[in-house]
Amino acid sequence: MEKILVLDFGGQTCQLIARRIRDIGVYSEILPGDTKITDKIMEDVKGIILSGSPYSVYDKDSPHVDNRVFDIGVPVLGICYGAQQITHLNGGKVMPLDHREYGRARLHFDNSFDLFQNVPQEFISWMSHGDTIVELPELYKVCARSENNIIAAFKHKNLPIYGIQFHPEVTHCEYGTRILENFAINICGCRKEWTMQNYLDDVSQDIKKQVGDEDVLLLISGGVDSTVVAGILLKALPPAQVHLMYVDTGLMRKNETIEVEENLKRLGAKNLYIVNAEEKFLSALKGKEDPEEKRRIIGDLFIKIQQEEIEKRNVNASFLAQGTLYTDMIESGKGVGSKAKVIKSHHNVRSPLVEQKRRENKIIEPLSMLYKDEVRRLGRFIGISESVLERHPFPGPGLAVRILGEVTKEKCEILREADYIYINELKNRGLYNDIWQAFAVLLPVKSVGVTGDDRHYGYVLALRAVVSSDGMTADAYPFPMKDLLEISAMITNRVKSIGRVVYDVSSKPPATIEWE
Ligand SMILES: Nc1ncnc2c1ncn2[C@@H]1O[C@H](COP(=O)(O)OP(=O)(O)OP(=O)(O)O)[C@@H](O)[C@H]1O
Ligand SMILES: O=c1[nH]c(=O)c2[nH+]cn([C@@H]3O[C@H](COP(=O)(O)O)[C@@H](O)[C@H]3O)c2[nH]1
Ligand SMILES: NC(=O)CC[C@H](N)C(=O)O
Ligand SMILES: [Mg+2]
């Protein structure tokens, strides 16, 4: 599929650039800004966007784009820091001026400027820069200035290389989407082929080709992602070829297994296996405190159990399907050709056994290029029920990454009960659907309290609730204090071992959504 590559230099709105491009109907992918531009990476790339950044181009350790982008002939658009890089790397001058621009700035431009086609000659842009382009490189010309007379847009005289100082990707920027559309469609020549129908056709074809008449085993959690994958597989292949396996790790939420089993039966799967593996998971996790080690153990155990179970049941499925998302890949340091840092090893990406399957081309992950909100859209498109699609995400390692430190059955019971009260209350209060993800976390510390005039030494429970669109960035949900106070009281009254409740107000970044 044709795509626009967004190179990420750490700008706050990098994700947004890719989303806007996709919303226009063109596939877009993000890679770290300093990725080496190889032929392989350039396959199907019709244009490149250089994102903003917290760095200044003249900083010693600032990230820079591979110079090759200027020679390969595909159009390049630099946004803010991206534009400053084009300037700096080609011999122009960027300086920190006293006059900074943050927020709205009126622009006016030369009306022959193709990037601004169908945009009124004056409009309100959105700026966020402290550095300013004071001199363009040779062969570049100014195409727009802001009301403060700074260079707001420029272009190479002969090549399709553009720079803009403002941020068309933010909704506050007038005509921002039109400008990105001018770039992607008119200048890069992309077709609008990123539709759910085309995506579905594409992945279905790929799956058929990859699998042939062999059987596929899908590890299914009943969550949004794997349920959508089940929907795709059951459409693409004869249902007899599709085997669904749900593993009860003992790290699940209260009543989860019963609810999931009911949902999966409704999907129309012929081969459905519910495996109880609580003992195995808890004993493998015994004494383990390190979050990454816990994740590794869980990831491997998932695969091991799956292998044992299919042998036991005489299922001959050589392909393994998973509901892996782009978020899982990039956080695990596995974005396409990625130099991204490992933030946390998602169990479904980093486990050695999964990696081996991936090398053998025996993995089917039709969602690995999508973000959560896009998966929900796709799910809606193929008719997955709203009650499944609206579920908050629940990580494969489950309560194991929400019980900080060592996991025990007793702690699982405590957390299960507290989490159940919390989530139920959010539903009762009509807050569940306003929140992207909510859960409780059991901390490995106890604190002193007083109950019934007696000393009580109980666990500290942290409540987490975030708003997000795709899980890559998130803000703490701004609860009305009354709800928090009431929910806290309910939990400490009903779950005896919990003595204190705190609310996590951190955003992502710098925190992550889960605590481990
Ligand atoms: N208990 C489980 N049994 C079987 N497979 C699982 C289980 N938990 C997770 N997986 C596998 O790991 C993948 C990643 O888990 P993840 O939680 O990100 O996705 P999900 O559970 O499908 O959706 P959601 O993010 O909405 O919870 C799943 O898509 C599924 O393939
Ligand atoms: O399937 C999963 N396996 C994992 O190992 C895993 N770790 C985090 N998550 C989920 O990913 C989203 C982002 O989480 P973080 O901000 O904590 O990285 C959130 O929705 C998390 O719940 C996981 N999902
Ligand atoms: N938003 C940006 O890309 C900012 C670029 C650079 N750090 C500046 O302040 O000018
Ligand atoms: Mg899940």
Image (cartoon, rainbow, N blue to C red):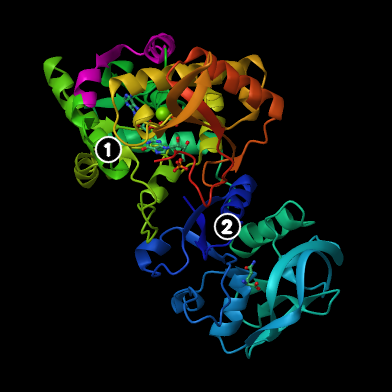
Looking at the rendering, the stretch of residues picked out in magenta corresponds to 255-282
Q: Which mark is residue 475?
A: none
Q: Is residue 382 magenta?
A: no
Q: Quadrant of residue 310?
A: top left
Indicate the secondary structure of the residue bearing disc 2.
Answer: helix
Find out if the beta carbon at label 1 lies less than 8 Å from the nearest ligand 2 atom: no
**220 up-or-down from 363: above or below:** above
Structural distance between the alpha carbons of marks 2 and 1? 31 Å
Q: Residues within 10 Å of mark 2 (few under 14, many from 20)?
A: many
Q: Give the residue number, with chain letter if any, for mark 1.
A: 294
Task: Tell me the quarter of the picture where residue 505 sits.
Answer: top right
Disc 2 marks which residue?
14
Tell me the crowding category of disc 1: few under 14, some 14 to 19, or many 20 or more residues within 10 angstroms, Cα based.
many
Left or right of 179 on screen, residue 455: left
Q: Residue at x 50, y 48 (%)?
A: 511
Q: Residue 279 in magenta? A: yes
